[in-house]
Image (cartoon, rainbow, N blue to C red):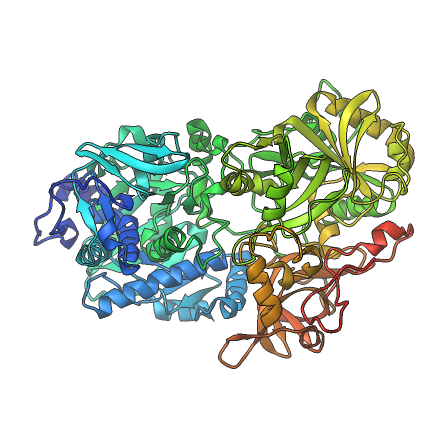
Amino acid sequence: MFVRRVRNGVQRYGAFKCIGAGSRTLSSLDNLDHEERLDGCLLSLPTNAKVVICGGGVMGAAVAYHLSKRGWGAQTVVIEKEKVGTGSRWYSSGLVGAFKPSLAQVKIAQSSIQLLKDLESRGRPTGWKQCGSLLLARTRDRMTVYRRMKSQSVSWGIECELVSPKRCQEIWPMLNVDDVLGGLWIPGDGVGDTHLFCMSLMREAVANGVGVMEDCAITAVHSKDGKVSGIDTTHGSIECQYFVNCAGFWARQIGQLAKPKVKVPLLPCEHYYLHTKRIDNLDPMTPVVRDPDGYIYLRERDGCILAGGFEPIAKPVYEEEIRNAEQRCVPEDWDHFHVLLQEIIKRVPSLSQAVLHKLCNGLEAFSPDCKWIVGETPEMFNYHVAAGMKTVGISAAGGVAEATVDEIVDGYTKYDMYELDINRFLGLHNNKRFLRDRMKEVPGVHYGLPYPFYEFEMGRNLRLSPIYPTLRDKGAVFGQVMGYERPTWFETIDKSTATPDNPQPFKIAHTKTFGKPHWFDTVQREYWACREAVGLADYSSFTKIDLQSQGNEVVDLLQYLCSNNVDVPIGSIIHTGMQNERGGYENDCSLARITENHYMMIAPTIQQTRCKVWLKRHLPRNGAVTLSDVTSMYTAICILGPFTRSLLSELTDTDLSPSNFPFFTFKELDVGLANGIRAMNLTHTGELGYVLYIPNEFALHVYNRLITVGEKYGISHVGYYATRSLRVEKFFAFWGQDLDTMTTPLECGRTWRVKFDKDIPFIGRDALLRQREEGIRRQYVQLLLTDHDHELDLWSWGGEPIYRDGNYCGQTTTTSYGFTFKKQVCLGFVQNLDENGVPQKVTNDYVLSGHYEIDIAGIRYAAKVNLHSPNLPTKYPDKERDVYQATRKLHESNQFLGRHYQP
């Protein structure tokens, strides 16, 4: 019935095209048709500026605002190809919510909300209404998500309440709650008007000296010596030192105008907004309703209902066809919208009697991982991007702009932005065909169930190691990281059906539960293979960088960049952090000294772009040090377990005894009939073994020899989940999961890897010396759940609150089941918070004297705390392995914060 009324509404009120830049007069019928104009715009371009911002939307306005607040207003110019704030208000939801997937995103959203409130308090209209939001759950798993959010709210400072179906209906009387199990009420959420917010920000910026040039398009962005030097526009050129791409929908195209081209992987999809006519007695403070199991949201707007959603299968669009804001509103596709329409009527049946005003199909750009894109680009220094806000620009703009401006002015930000940093991408992510393929499922992630280890299904089989087909046929189930297909676990294969003429299908990993996963037993078998026999894992996705020089320049460079001492004997491997000026980890890597002036760096997979940018930023200008990304040249096979030395000894003539090839050293080996294999005596898990970096042409040969000879030693294929469990149990910290740009070595048990007395002071040394003097404010710990039933209870998956003596004190980072401990193992950081929530000094005595609990979805489980890597019981003890502890306990009584080297 409603579909008929909808179609009648369309016929009755006309085609209802979205209003673009040309319709700027107030309509008595629709306030949304009105767009304000900015006064005081420039009539001609200046010849130079310190900062040029591309884009006069809400993000560009927010960056201009924050720059002006930092005193850079008179040195900043905004370039807008149409009018500031252009873009129909019909295709903007204005939803503002504080809950986001990570702490950094939460803080950014909270900063944006505070900015909305501040502007309103100063008389600048933003449309802000703190009406609250109600999240509905139709399934038990969704309620688990809400219970997890409720427990995390303590860490994130968000007021919220779990509510019953009856309470949901009291909050929103029009709801049908017959299939609702409960919900989450967030009173601090609200709505705003993106257009008004944009105009208020820009007016404040202009008042503080920012210049704005409308009807002016950028045609090129130039660089000199790797840095932004200026731009060309349709109205002339400007010399500048910084460029900020806030072009939103067109950010990718603007990136292509740079010389060299800048990759901004974004692609638009159709996105629908259904507007009803006015509904009688609708309270202006009606809360936002989000029903993610039905993919939809609803809100009140000017006495009407605005409804929209994020359908599971989206429709990507090539943005080259869209040349202005008016064209971003494309013809509606009722068949495509039908899945959302059905859910809207199901949730609010009374809407079947409402009259449709408009269905707007406004294009919105998304990134390939459904996260915002922020930061300085790898192709050009001083070129910053703030785009890909995926329809919620109003709730991101204030915080993202603040972080961007902090990076420009101070060189760093108070937010840990690595998960949003544009350096998380490679060139493949900007491939238009890849984006079009991937984008079909990206918008649906917005309201999808956030199960652990989520994997995209589109845009797969891109980066494959030479042994990938063989691993697939051996039962590998794959996860993707930086485009690489990496085995997560190996299913048992029926050998009678596995033939060369009948290859196994490509299988994507999934974990569609918050409790014991279906792969538990499989990973357990792989784990014990690594501890009691031989496991073989594909490490090919690891970042591999060669650094060389003719003289000692490479040694001096690495001594400056690394907090550990890299001037070690040839053949040694050193594990080191690369710190920033605040002492935080920009990179965490292993360096093998191949020759006097040649190092091979092994870094996390996700660091492939990021670490190269950090290195290039500090390379000598005279080219004395060369950097080569050899990631794709080598296949990395790791063999783990007590019999790996015996196995490898059968394949090489090199003496592998501890006296000739000790732990944490490197040798170039002949293996089988192949040569030039870079072998490293470590596994990154704490287990005995080797990582073999094999030239690709030899990879399959070496793999086959390892498998053939390894049969007598019980060799098994193992995946990422098993090696992850090993390293969590051994208390090994990984960058991007435990370590980040805000975490220092002193906070995570790695003081022994910091050499303060090196001849060349390293980056971050002064900050770490201050921290050593003043004391740390948080401590990295390992927690073992003592009263948790892994068969029945929900699992810890990371991000859970930690309580000490009943008081909140921190969060977990990485978690896993410990198959030796036979307990859930959680890594995380503990703080000493005073009654006002201010962190105080943390000592080992403080950590060890408390009683700990971890809150998993509202249930607290007792936990035993460890400050150092445990020595796990084993059938095959080994002195080399047992003496090494990645995270070390206190050694010197006068030092309360570090764990130092234990010979």
Above or below, comparing residue 519 to residue 236 in the picture: below
- Can you tell which quarter of the image residue 350 is in? bottom left
Q: Residue 480, percent across and down?
A: 59, 38
Q: Nearer the viewer, residue 306 or 392?
A: 392
Q: Nearer the viewer, residue 179 or 430?
A: 430
Q: Nearer the viewer, residue 599 or 325?
A: 599
What residue do we see at 29% from left, 36% from top?
230
What residue do we see at 17% from left, 40% from top?
45
Tell me: 162 left or right of 748.
left
Above or below, comparing residue 543 to residue 123 in the picture: above
- Can you tell which quarter of the image residue 16 is in? top left
Q: From this viewpoint, is residue 856 visible?
A: no
- Can you tell which quarter of the image residue 840 is in? bottom right
Q: Residue 785, percent across and down?
A: 71, 66
Tell me: 660 left or right of 717.
right
Identity of the residue furthest to the bottom in this view: 835
Identity of the residue furthest to the top in this view: 501
What residue do we see at 65% from left, 72% from top?
853
Above or below, comparing residue 184 to residue 21 in the picture: below
Above or below, comparing residue 865 to residue 79 in the picture: below
Quadrant including the C terminus: bottom right
Q: From this viewpoint, is residue 694 visible?
A: yes
Q: Residue 505, percent across and down?
A: 65, 28
What residue do we see at 59% from left, 48% from top?
560
Give the total of numbered labels: 0
Q: Residue 686, percent across and down?
A: 78, 50
